[in-house]
Structure formats: structure tokens, C-alpha cells
Image (spheres, grey):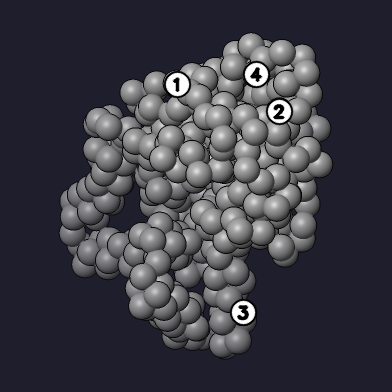
């Protein structure tokens, strides 16, 4: 998206596209791509601690609020992937921190308890209800959790301090140790150790092999056919793999009639020869006078739809890509 920037005309907010293009200044290494989301995740951990302090919590509450944000897979996965998710979590948490600060400054210094932060509570509750009513995905509520962790950590610290003031020396240590231990154990138990792999991790596999297989099919064509060939990815992951890994194999850019890729257009070539990554014979035959399978890529650990992907060579299609492109608007 960074190479085809269309502000506010894409599937995602424009910041992720701008950050993607900025990351390319440092190369296409994993370090360059993952540095920005990792930095956002680190800032999110800090914001959780600051929220606990804003709510009146001491060092223990700040630590207890930051730990689950630092260690649980909901946030670790987001901080490991170059997607809008971690930035959504960051902006929501920053906004709720500013709302908490406004609430605290809006009440006299003598105010105690949670009254200054009722706007934060209502914001979290209303957001959660809206997400539920609109049947949002489970992780959509993730940006609310750092604030809720911070509030819960402050409650636990106040409970612990109250027991200490009443002369219960052991109870506060048990409560604090148990709370920290619970976070650590919970984070360890739900790490992706089972099979099959969670989608985010499985979705990292298989893409270089797909690009290499398409390259073998492409370079098997005659020079005249290669000049006419257009590469098509049948989903944005396959098209992205061809664009990302393809240049090292001497491949031209890909097109894809799906998602934001559709807005990038079919290119200038009419598509007299098409190399299609993905799809089935039944799906492609209506478009092609002559269709042959040019390869197949298998990856047992990938997401199910990427475990066995065919490569098709379409010669003499019935229509040009430019004529077909409007039909595919809105495909996903």
C-alpha cells in the first residue's frame, strides 16, 4: 500500500501504509519491518503503567498493569506483526490515558476514589457493548484491556495496602505474589505451543516458496511470452508475496482483483498470457481458452488455504484484464 498510496481510499487507515514505505528506507529485512510494531508495543506497555499511576497506583500497581500487556499473546502477537492492530491498541490506550488525566484535573485535589475517572469507565463499557452488538472480532476489544488491567491493578494494590494497615502482614505478600504469578503462568500457558499453529504464525509460512515456484514457471516461458505475461495473485497474501519476494527472482509486479489491490488496477498489459497463483481449474476455465497447471506449492504448516496452492498458465484469455477489472470490484 505504501507504493500505491491512496490516502483514505484503502482497506486500512493510511498510517500503516506510510510506515510501511518508511520502513523500506532501511531495507526489506524482518528487523526493519518489525521494528515499528515492536516499538509501538513497548510504548503500550509504558502507557499501561502510566494509566495505573494516573489512577493513583504505586509501583506495584504500575508493574502489575504493565506485565500482562508485555507478556500475553494478545499484545505480543500484535507487536510482532506489521498490521494496524498494535497501532489501534496504542492510540486507544493513549486516548484513554488523556481522558483519565482530564478527569483527574477536573476534580479538586481532595477527591478520592474512582469518581474522576468515570468517563474512562463509561468509554470502556460503551465501546465494549458496541463491539459486541456489531459482532466484532474478539481482538477488537483488545485496546480496552490495558486500561482495565491498570484499574484492576490499582484495586489489588489498595486491597493489599488495606490488609497491611489492619495488621495482616502475610496476606498482602500472598496477594501481590499470587497476582504476578497468575499473569506469568497465564501468559506461559497460552503461548502457541499446540498444533496447528495459530493463524498469525501460520500466515508467515510458505510465501517465499510460492514466489520461487511462480518464478520457475515464468522463466520456463519463451522470451516473447514473458514480455506478454501478467502475474495474478488470487488473494492479497499471494500477490504480496509475489511483489515482495518476486524481484529477487526477476519477476514483474503482480496484480490482484481483491481488496486494496483492486484499486491498483490491472496494469497496462492486456494479459495475453497469465500466470495465476491460486484458484482452481473450475474457477479459471471460464476466462481462458487454454489453461494448464504450471506448478503446485505445498506447505503443511501454513494456514489451510495456503497448504496446497496451484499455479496456472492461462493463454489466450477471452477478455483483456482491463475489460474484466470492473467486474471484480469488491472481491475479497
Residue 45 shown left or right of residue 263 in the figure: left
Residues marked 4 and 2 touching at CB (< 8 Å): yes
Out of 229 and 177, give the one closest to the viewer: 229
Q: Considering only vertical position in the picture, is 282 above or below 242?
A: below
Q: Mark 4 points at which residue?
A: 218
Per the image, label 3 sits on a secondary structure element best described as helix
Out of 319 and 194, give the one closest to the viewer: 319
Q: Name the residue under label 3.
A: 102
How far is the residue under mark 2 from the one under mark 3? 59 Å
Residues marked 2 and 3 touching at CB (< 8 Å): no
Q: Nearer the viewer, mark 3 or mark 1?
A: 1
Q: Name the residue under label 1.
A: 296
Residue 256 shown left or right of residue 163 in the figure: right
Q: Considering only vertical position in the picture, is 128 above or below 12?
A: below
How far is the residue under mark 4 from the one under mark 3? 60 Å
How far is the residue under mark 3 from the one under mark 1? 58 Å
Tell me which numbered mark, 4 or 1, is placed earlier along the sequence.
4
Residue 229's label in the rendered image is: 2
How far is the residue under mark 4 from the one under mark 1? 13 Å
Tell me which numbered mark, 2 or 1, is placed earlier along the sequence.
2
Tell me which numbered mark, 2 or 3, is placed earlier along the sequence.
3
Tell me which numbered mark, 3 or 1, is placed earlier along the sequence.
3
Amino acid at each position: 500500500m505504501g507504493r500505491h498510496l491512496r490516502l483514505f481510499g484503502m482497506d486500512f487507515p493510511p498510517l500503516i501504509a506510510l510506515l510501511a514505505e518508511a520502513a523500506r528506507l532501511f531495507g526489506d529485512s524482518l528487523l526493519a519491518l518489525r521494528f515499528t510494531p515492536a516499538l509501538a508495543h513497548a510504548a503500550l506497555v509504558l502507557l499501561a503503567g502510566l494509566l495505573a499511576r494516573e489512577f493513583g497506583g504505586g509501583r506495584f500497581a504500575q508493574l502489575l498493569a504493565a506485565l500482562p500487556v508485555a507478556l500475553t499473546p494478545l499484545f505480543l502477537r500484535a507487536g510482532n506483526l506489521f498490521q494496524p492492530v498494535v497501532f489501534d491498541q496504542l492510540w486507544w490506550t493513549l486516548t484513554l490515558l488523556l481522558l483519565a488525566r482530564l478527569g483527574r484535573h477536573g476534580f479538586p485535589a481532595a477527591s478520592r476514589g474512582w469518581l474522576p475517572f468515570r468517563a474512562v469507565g463509561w468509554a470502556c463499557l460503551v465501546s465494549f457493548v458496541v463491539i459486541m452488538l456489531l459482532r466484532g472480532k474478539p481482538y477488537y476489544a483488545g485496546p480496552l484491556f490495558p486500561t482495565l488491567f491498570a484499574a484492576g491493578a490499582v484495586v489489588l494494590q489498595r486491597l493489599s495496602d488495606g490488609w497491611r494497615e489492619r495488621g495482616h502482614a502475610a496476606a498482602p505478600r500472598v496477594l501481590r505474589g499470587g497476582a504476578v504469578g497468575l499473569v506469568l503462568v497465564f501468559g506461559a500457558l497460552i503461548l502457541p505451543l499446540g498444533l496447528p499453529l495459530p493463524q498469525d504464525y501460520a500466515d508467515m509460512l510458505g510465501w517465499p516458496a510460492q514466489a520461487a515456484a511462480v518464478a520457475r514457471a515464468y522463466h520456463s516461458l519463451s522470451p516473447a511470452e514473458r514480455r506478454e505475461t501478467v502475474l495474478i495473485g488470487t488473494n492479497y497474501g499471494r500477490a504480496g508475496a509475489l511483489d515482495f519476494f518476486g524481484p529477487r527472482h526477476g519477476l514483474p509486479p503482480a496484480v490482484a482483483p481483491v481488496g486494496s489491490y483492486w484499486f491498483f488496477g490491472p496494469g497496462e498489459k492486456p494479459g495475453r498470457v497469465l500466470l495465476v497463483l491460486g484458484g482452481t481449474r473450475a474457477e479459471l476455465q471460464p476466462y481462458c481458452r487454454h489453461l494448464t497447471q504450471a506448478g503446485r506449492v505445498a506447505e503443511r504448516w501454513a494456514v489451510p488455504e495456503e497448504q496446497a496452492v496451484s499455479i496456472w498458465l492461462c493463454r489466450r484469455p477471452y477478455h483483456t484484464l482491463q475489460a474484466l477489472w470492473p467486474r471484480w470490484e469488491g472481491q475479497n
